[in-house]
Every structure is written in structure tokens, then in C-alpha cells.
Image: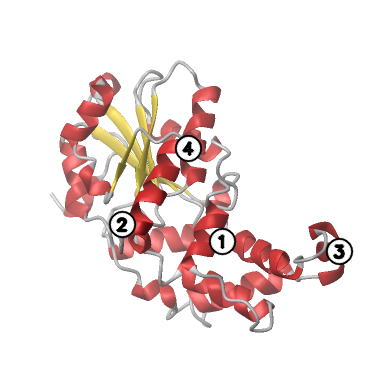
Amino acid sequence: MTPGAELAQAESFDRADRLTAIVVFDIDGVVRDVGGSYRRALADTVEHFTGGAYRPSQTDIDALKAEGIWNNDWEASQELVYRYFAQGRSREATRSTLQLDYNELVAFFQARYRGPDPTHWTGYICQEPLLLSRAYFEQLTHAQIRWGFFSGATTGSARYVLERRLGLSDPTLIAMEDAPGKPDPTGLLQTVSLLKGLDTTPVIYVGDTVGDIRTVINARQAQPDRPWLAVGVLPPHVQTTEAHRQPYRATLQTAGAQVVFDNAQELTPAAIEALLTE
């Protein structure tokens, strides 16, 4: 059996009721380290559109993400530009007078993240360290745990890391183009539906932001009969010192994470069983 065939999941189990759980993963900060790619492109974009006057730090970006509604990094870039120019006056007035071209902002961001050639990528995306291995997903499959991905990344970016970098074969994925942004739970619900478990199969969503955790809370409201669990992961950029780690961990726990790991691979089949029996 080829590795791709071994990882194919759609009909890999004889009976849906043999599933112990469904695990859905965010991608950025969970599958790949985007501190030097998406976040770098975000900072570049804000710096460019503020005329070099302001380059947001990782702490600035974390503070924005902690609001729970800025999962889209293009929109996050735009918001930070608006907030810079809004100092001392209303944000509404700034938005109406600044006349920021969103499409131009997105194009600039993508030129940094993907590179100037939209076909042959040479940008920051090529330098992203992987945080998970293909062997980890094989471990979940062998434990009769289905898995997939719900991410605010574009389909091209998500499939680049999942298929070309990790070597997964046609993984179940709902990306930016497929559903509203988080914390709207629609994309998570779509991912779970594609994985074809029973209506009562527990679902674990693994993410690194407040928006990810709130997505689980909203999914609970949409489907209250199914068990929904939120697992937080500390992105690499906050793991450099305890002064960064602990506040970020506390933020995810306060938002509703059942547990927070340093790396998603700590969510082993045994850890999943423990979560489901608590």
C-alpha cells in the first residue's frame, strides 16, 4: 500500500460507529509555524501602508488576535493600518477619509507571502517550519480517529503545506474560500460533515487563537447534542520565554480551551481518550 493510500480516510473504516472521535485541526500555528511568514507578511503590509511609520510587533498582533475576530490576516493588516491612523480621532472618520484599497493591500501581502510570481512561489511560505509529521496523522488513523482541517488560510496555501510539505493525500479541508471566517462555526461543521461520523461522535478542534476556541463554543450552540472540545496550542513565537507562554496559555484557557499543549502532537490517542472521559 502506498503512503497516500494508507492515509486515505473517507471510507477507511467499515462502520462509522467504530470511530472514537473526530479531530479537526487549524493550520497556521498548529501545523506550520507562521511567525516568519504570515505574521511577517502582515507586519510588512502594515509598515508599507503606514508609510514606514509603524511595524506591529508579535505582541501587537497577538493583542489583535486575542479579540477573537481577526482570523483573516488580510483583514487584520487592514485593521492595524486603520488603528494607527485613527489615533486621536474616531476610527469611523479614519476609514472614510483614508480610502485604503483593500485589493491593493491583499496583493502586497500575497507578494510577500507567496512571492511576486503567483505560479511559482518563492515567498515566505517556502520557509515555514512544520510542527506536525505525517506519522502523527497515521497514528490517529490507526486508532480509528478521523481527522481533517478547517483553516482561514487560502486553499492554495493550505494544500501547499498539507500535500506538498507534509505529503498527505487529498486531506479533508475547509479553507478560506469555502466558509465564513472564524469564529463562525460553519466551516468546522462542514469539515465534520465531510468526515462522516455519527451525529454523536465527539469532535475536538485544535487551534492556537481565541477565534479558534470561540468557534468551538459556537459549534456547541449550533449542535448541542454532540460533544465539542476545544484544544489550544501555543504557537512557537510565544514559547521563547515563560513571560510570553503563561499569559498566552491563560488567554486560551479563559476563552474556553479544555487543555493547552505546546505542540498538537501531544494530542495522542491516549490523550484524546483521557479528554473524552473527563
How far is disc 3 from disc 1 in space, using C-alphas?
21 Å
Query: Of label 2 and label 1, which has the lower sequence position?
Result: 1
Give the Cα distance between marks 3 and 4. 33 Å
Q: Residues within 10 Å of mark 3 (few under 14, many from 20)?
A: few
CA separation in Å, label 1 and label 4: 20 Å
Q: Nearer the viewer, mark 3 or mark 2?
A: 2
**At label 1, which amino acid type do we have?**
Asp
The three-letter amino acid code for the residue at tag 4 is Ala
Question: Within 10 Å of the Cα at label 2, are there few (<14), some (14-19), or many (20+) other Cα atoms?
Answer: few
> What secondary structure is found at the residue carrying circle 3?
helix
Query: Which numbered disc flags the more N-terminal residue, 1 or 4?
Result: 1
Q: Which residue is mark 4?
A: 255
Q: Decide: marks 3, 2 in contact (CB < 8 A)?
A: no
What x and y, as percent, mark residue 58?
A: 47, 66
- Asked where in the image residue 196 lies, by quadrant, the reply is top left
Q: Amino acid at mark 2?
A: Glu
Camera-near label (2 vs 1) is 2
Mark nearest the camera among 1 and 4 is: 4
In this picture, residue 183 sits left or right of residue 231? right
Residue annotated with mark 2: 242
Which residue is the extreme one toward the top?
Answer: 225
